[in-house]
Amino acid sequence: MTTTLEHATPDHPGPDHGYPEHYEPPRGPYWRLFFGPGLVRGVWMALAFFVFGLLIVAGLRWWWGWDPILHWEVIAAVAGMTTAPIGFLAGIGSFDYWLHYIVGRPTRPEDHSGHGATSWKDYFRVNTDHKVIGIQYLVTTFVFFTIGGLMAMLFRAELAQPGLQFVDPQTFNGLVSVHATLMIFLFIIPAFAGIANFVVPLMLGAPDMAFPRLNALSFWLLPIAGLMFVTSFVVSGGAFGAGWTGYAPLAEGQPLGQTFFNIGVQWAGASSIMTALNFLVTIITMRAPGMTFWRMPLLVWANFTTSLLVVIATPFIAGSQFFVMFDRIMHTSFFVPDGGGYVLGYQHIFWFYSHPAVYIMMLPGFGIVSEVISSMSRKPIFGYRLMALSLMGILVLGFSVWAHHMFVAGMADWLRVPMMITTLLIAIPTGIKVFSWIATLWRGRIHLTTPMLFALGFVTMFTIGGLSGIYLGSVPIDIAASDTYFIVAHIHYVLFGGSVFTIFAGVYFWFPKITGRMYDERLGKLHFWLTFVSFNATFFPMHYVGLRGMPRRVSDYSEAFGDLNFAISIASFVLGASFVVFAYNIIVSWVRGPIAGGNPWRAHTLEWQVTSPPPIFNFDEIPQVVGGPYEYGVPGARHAVMSAAAAEPQEVRA
Amino acid sequence: MTAHAETHDHHGPPLAHQSSRVDARVLGMFLFIASEAMLFGSFFTAYFFVRVVNPSAPETWPPEPYHFPVFVAGVNTAILVTSSFTMHWALQSIKRGERRAFLAGMVLTFLMGLAFLLTQVVEYIHVGFNTGDGAFASVFFGLTGLHGAHVFVGLTLLGMVIVRGFRGHYTPEHHHGVELPGIYWHFVDVMWIVVYAAVYLI
Amino acid sequence: MRRGIAQLVAIGVVIALLLTVVAVVFKWLPTSASEEFDRIQAVYWFATVISIGIFALVAAVIVFSVWKWRVPLDDDADGPPIHGHTGLEIAWTAVPAILVIAIGVVSAVVLARNGEAGTRPLEINAIGQQFAWKFVYSDYDDLRSGQLVLPVNQEARFTMTAVDVLHSFWVPNFGQKMDAVPGIETSIIVTPTREGEFQVVCAELCGFGHATMRAKARVVSRAEFDRWIQEQNA
Ligand code: HEA
Ligand code: HEA
Ligand code: CUA
Ligand SMILES: [Cu+2]
């Protein structure tokens, strides 16, 4: 076990422990390899728990005299997707501390042996350092982005011509569904969580998150969920093919793969709820002295509102997937009309989460872009308070619009107009943000770095996506455009041109902070322009084919759309290839980019006032916050005093 | 860039500044409960759809040949509500340093919770319908089952407190480990009253 | 600064003009073949005018600012510390509010109009089933047909259900679309205005045959419609 620190100091005194002795792992290295926390123990414990789950299912079925005793769908759900992952988590050591605590054994005082990373191996264990966890998140999510993106390449190849060429329709549906599921649950949402994990505690002037062990656990739930989505392809019947929305009753009649979606979403959802809870508690209780809410950087505000959304909304998708799973496995009839169920109930419950989820996938990006634009224009954010309040406005309004996904679903007619109005009203707080960003540019001293390019690309592309959202918010237009490629265009303008652009902006922006090295600016710009152009070439024509009459989620389509789809597919391959530039830049720069220094952007927020990468406990001394986070151009203004002892200003101007 | 940062790798983290009067763990528990309440909310929504919105909603509740064991569940409700009081008593006792009363309270609470859960299992066996018998059964088993799972989690937490309690942990100064499971247990109780009212009574 | 504003406006106008050309030159919408779609297209154009204006504004400010105030990366001065401007902030809250409410009102009016069935609509049940449509003419002894035939200029009310999973009834040229849902009935009104052959498309993912769940829709004159009914009954 690597210990980054020679001598341990108990920091946050855990509840009720008074045991000063330092935990010493007993016995020899082999014993430790197999029985100590780590991936090896994770694997065999997963297997053991799988057998355990299997025996429980088989035992109960035998006891009740049900046939067959080995019901593989149930076994897959219980043993494969519930107990085995728990075994894995226990194996890698996620629960070690709590198990000691539960049985009343002396808990190991936090000796920070689970903190920090000295070698790449430290990224493959339960690590409680928010910076390590942030990197774990980012790397994992980009892996899943690649997988999800390659699936898009596959079905784009299929769509290049009308008729069927490469895959059968069920596989096609599986590819589309897994593509979207990975992008949403394994890329956008956790990638934002990763950036925030790294940055938010630093911005707050906190040594770590409020619950570091919970933080580590939240991360490790993700690969479990991702693995479930991806492996659903290998089971009989193929991957879940009812779309990422998994509408009942179609989802209830799908083969086994659908269960992978039902349960995978639970793991991903649990992960995001736990992370959100952690952010909320951290932001509320661990701000540095002087850091009032009105002095928090907008990224912190954005994660605060997002986390509220997650905590409140996510249980609804959990519910919706439970019901579908019960209908599938336990023969309940939540959404089975013959049994007295109500089909549209699924959509209401699903969208009550999944609409707020689109803001979960956007608000953190708003935060990132605010940081980038203000520090790259060397100006304070225009209308800081309204920027924070508009986030809250979106949060509140976001809960009142879910049925705009159901305008043509046959729901109660009287719900349409109220839902249309609330939907359209969201343009107001969002517009405030867009206008404030461009007003921040006004008369600034604009540094057109790669993160800035992505931020500006985001503002324009997201405006297009938002405006197509306004079309859809208008019920009559939605009636014509719903379930067509117009929706696909909207999705990708807001999610790719929106969220993904902000993730790129954030990764480039904090890359020097995270790695201590600078990325290659030329390659960064090449990446931006390639992505920007091919992105538009891919997705803008989709508005057209959609309005003209091409439905979404089809493997085959009318000849009339052949040429355009061919062009779209070619553009999408270029878009995919542009990612190679990014990957190359990041990997090479990480290994041997030029040393970046603590504050290459001369930004004011706290994460830039420490070394790059930041010291293991972030701050030697908790800083004292004395002003707003974006006081660019204000003579003598400071966000924080880093050390009570240091009289001289250390930050700003090099 | 701070000049002094590198030289200090070798000491523990600075103590975080506590920027709110609320204790982090209590706040965390309340947020967790908020999301749990929303999970129940999704199940109540399903109930609402099946029973109210659905054009083919059953005339009577439960539909004709079936009955819910209102009385047994009522007794069960009483048990669970009482256990909330014993929980409170246990917490007050440890705050006053009365160890034995604390342990007695905890054990009593645990036993009542267990009795509730066992009664529910027996109720399931004798209730006369199964998960496959229609949407009313789906929401019945859904809501009571979700709640039962929460009782189970609550019992695990209580069991933890009991084990540690008998090992001599907790003092009048340090009783968060009792307080937090207590908050959760009260939540489980309140939730049951809502479930009971919605499923059995109205 | 006055010259700057003029340049900004010029950029904005150029962008707006370009977008207008794109919006007008390409035929974004299928030919309308129903009264309902005519109204929907009006809303569409209304939203498009507003969208072009908004996008031109946003894009113009960005292009102009970058063009005007871009500095080399090693420049280390700061911009002027402008923290906000109450008047502007009120304006960009109020103006979008007015615009979206206008869109909302127009949409609500059109929605209400498109839901009016007229005095005696032709009643048709559309039944979705994996993977074909069935149309039942309840005014004509429950005549069943796999093909949709409609008399021109006559309101038709489609009442939909589904046998197995969700489907969605859509004829792109009619503009109207509605899911067919197992267990409940849904409905839409279509008043065809143009004779010809169109496609009924299933727009809701319904399984592996979703892409090919198509049917033919023919809009014909009243006389021809009556003839068709007779043929079918014969
Ligand atoms: C990041 C994700 C994201 C975001 C931010 C949004 C934002 C919005 N979305 Fe989108 N949406 C999705 C992701 C997102 N959406 C996805 C994934 C789906 C498909 C799900 C599926 O079925 O698979 C979807 C589907 C979807 C539908 C359902 C379509 C259908 O299936 O029939 C609707 C309908 O109302 C809609 C509307 C909107 C609106 C009004 C906004 C607004 O929030 C946009 C507000 C922003 C602006 C308007 C631009 C900036 C504003 C100004 C510059 C001010 C001035 C503006 C005006 C005066 C108009 N979206
Ligand atoms: C954040 C979300 C996100 C992102 C980033 C993407 C990215 C992409 N999406 Fe996706 N998409 C969705 C979310 C997203 N999508 C959602 C929610 C749906 C709805 C699903 C549903 O209906 O249920 C959808 C549906 C969807 C459809 C409609 C399918 C249908 O209805 O039948 C299409 C069609 O073209 C598509 C295409 C693409 C393409 C080409 C990319 C590209 O941008 C991907 C680019 C990335 C890569 C290619 C990977 C990395 C690259 C390399 C490793 C380099 C090597 C590769 C090459 C050289 C080719 N997506
Ligand atoms: Cu029927 Cu799609
Ligand atoms: Cu939405």
Image (cartoon, coloured by chain):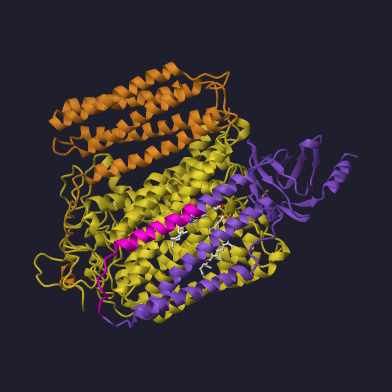
Judged from the image, the quadrant occupied by ligand 2 is bottom right
Q: Is residue A12 above or below residue B77?
A: below
The quarter of the image holding the N terminus of chain C is bottom left
Q: Which of the chains is purple?
A: C
Chain B takes which shade in the image?
A: orange
Left or right of residue A516: residue B60: right
In which quarter of the view is residue A106 placed? top left
In which quarter of the view is residue A630 placed? bottom left
B28 or A465: nearer the viewer = A465
Q: Main structural element of the magenta stretch: helix, strand or loop? A: helix
State which region is magenta.
C77-102
Residue B159 visible to the viewer: no
Location of residue A516 in the rendering, given as x and y in whole percent from the top left corner = 29, 73
Residue shown at 56%/39% (left/top)? A412
A605 or C37: nearer the viewer = C37
C98 or A102: nearer the viewer = C98
In which quarter of the view is residue A427 placed? bottom left
Q: Is residue A375 above or below residue C181?
A: below
Q: Which of the chains is yellow?
A: A
